[in-house]
Amino acid sequence: MREFSLPALYEVPADGNLTDLIHRNAAQHPDVPVIARKRGSRWEDVTATAFLGEVRAAAKGLIAAGVQPGDRVGLMSRTRYEWTLLDFAIWSAGAVTVPVYETSSPEQIAWILGDSGAVGCFGETAVHEAAVESVRDRLPELKHIWQIEGGAVEHLRSEGAHLTDGEVDERSAMASADSPATIVYTSGTTGRPKGCVLTHRNFFAECGNIVERLRPLFRTGDASVLLFLPVAHVFGRLVEIASVLAPIKLGHVADITNLTDELASFRPTMVLGVPRVFEKVYNSARAKAQADGKGKIFDKAADTAIAYSRALDTPSGPSLGLKFKHKVFDRLVFSKLRTVLGGRGEYAISGGAPLGERLGHFYRGIGFTVLEGYGLTESCAATSFNPWDRQKIGTVGQPLPGSVVRIADDGEVLLHGEHLFAGYWGNEAATAEAMSDGWFHTGDIGTLDEDGYLAITGRKKEIIVTAGGKNVAPAVIEDRIRAHALIAECMVVGDGRPFVGALITLDEEFLPRWAEDHGKPAGVTPAELAQDPELLAAVQQAVEDGNAAVSKAESVRKFRILPSQFTEESGHVTPSLKLKRNVVAKDYAHEIEAIYSA
């Protein structure tokens, strides 16, 4: 199939903007908790009425500070309650939010705030405030810097106390559906980030149709979601706004070091995350079972879960014997895994990278279905996702209701719909290139099946052509290799080379456990283990698992283990954890040469 669409399930308001949602919630659900705020070790509910009051108070302070309709205001912070509060306060002042990743360098901060012409910026900590101050002389339009942990919200409340609610509401009503809501700067694997202008209409079309298609997951007064993704990323923003639109209770977590503890205390009914989160939960559970001498039981349980899930897709369904084994393992293993994920949830939504078919079947088999989706900043997050009642594991689902997916002659995925961005800020040439012929060109290669389910097979610009003329899509094998507990990242190489190779980094969080289980010295480093026979054998097994998904010509023949993981600080990944392939290839050119000269 070359093109597929679904009718819209949600009608975007002819006028109005996202602030209408918090007014509607206060009117229709005044006492329903729409947000939970962490106070020490306890979660404190914030009702729809109380949240509207807090937003108004902060918006008054912005208006008093001179923020005008259409002005841009930067927001640099980890995921926390104040992010959502200030996002809606900025909109309520008639302004436009410009997210800045809290890990951004001064150079990146200067570019984003300067390019957008921001008149003010919130920083979470004194460190963030200092980073913005360090480039202030390059930002002539920047008049204000507020520090969240330095009392910014209280300051705004005090400064705007003389304004009335009516004055704020009048300002809130100024933006139309087609006014910019935010300018999200793409992480950029090459060159300077481009500012994607997303309108209020884009978010209404995106979040409204997702909530309606997944309505059983968005039950007002009962459902809840714990947001631990960066809200500076469009996926995190989707979670925020969809939760308010539904509405369901929204919680925020800034530090995911102890994510399982946070899930246990908040007990969400739904989890939204990236594949790495679900991989780590699986790998940690398996490693713990092995450490407790129950590794064989866990592996049998995992195989049963996967077989059970696969059987669900057959006409006859699971056999009686498989049902019995599944019931036994549900009591012994699966129920405990669901408890790790909060204990109340049945569904999760995953995006940002492929989850992998095996892991998808594993989670559905344990009673915690992970619905995969796909999207970009330019598509306001998800442009396709699996419906809760008709999931096809191994695909990223059907198009967002009200939108169209088309596959071009060269396999590129093209998009059309109300959820697509208004353009790149101040960059008409780039906008025209991305939106040629009225379709957004994603740069991704994919296919549509007979039911309109999309599968992504790679990036158009990342296709490797070996010396033998074989076209290789790196994502397929990279995702399979990276699913191994020991592997942090994998980058396939081989453009113009005689065969396919790979650069591999080790998961520094999992490595100590592996080293202890295999009798290695305490504190051993990835660099020290790079030539360890047992570790090389384990990595080789991961590579062979990946090779099983592709043809012989596409398989990895040789690999090199690098001394450390790719990080944003090292410049090898973007804030959304996408590989900067050109940077990795340049910095590890010697290692790549070694693959082909050894």
Image (tube, helix red, strand yellow):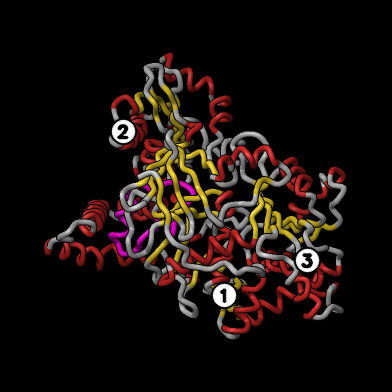
Residue under pointer 1:
42
Rendered residue at 82%/45% (across/down) = 134
Quadrant housing the C terminus: top left
- Front residue of 78/518: it is 78
Q: Is residue 521 visible?
A: no
Q: Is residue 143 visible?
A: yes
Relative horizontal placement of residue 54, taking residue 9 as reference (left or right): right
- Front residue of 230/342: it is 230
Horizontal and vertical percent position of residue 541? 31, 35
Residue under pointer 3:
152
Residue under pointer 2:
550
User: Which badge, 3 or 2, is on the more N-terminal residue?
Assistant: 3
Q: Is residue 366 magenta?
A: yes
Q: Which residues are magenta?
A: 349-372
Horizontal and vertical percent position of residue 245? 56, 71
Q: Residues within 10 Å of mark 2 (few under 14, many from 20)?
A: some
User: Which badge, 2 or 1, is on the more N-terminal residue?
Assistant: 1
Q: Residues within 10 Å of mark 3 (few under 14, many from 20)?
A: some
Q: Are marks 3 and 1 in contact (CB under 8 Å)?
A: no
Q: Up-down: is 85 above or below 494?
A: below
Q: Is residue 404 magenta?
A: no
Rendered residue at 52%/20% (across/down) = 590
Amino acid under disc 2 = Val
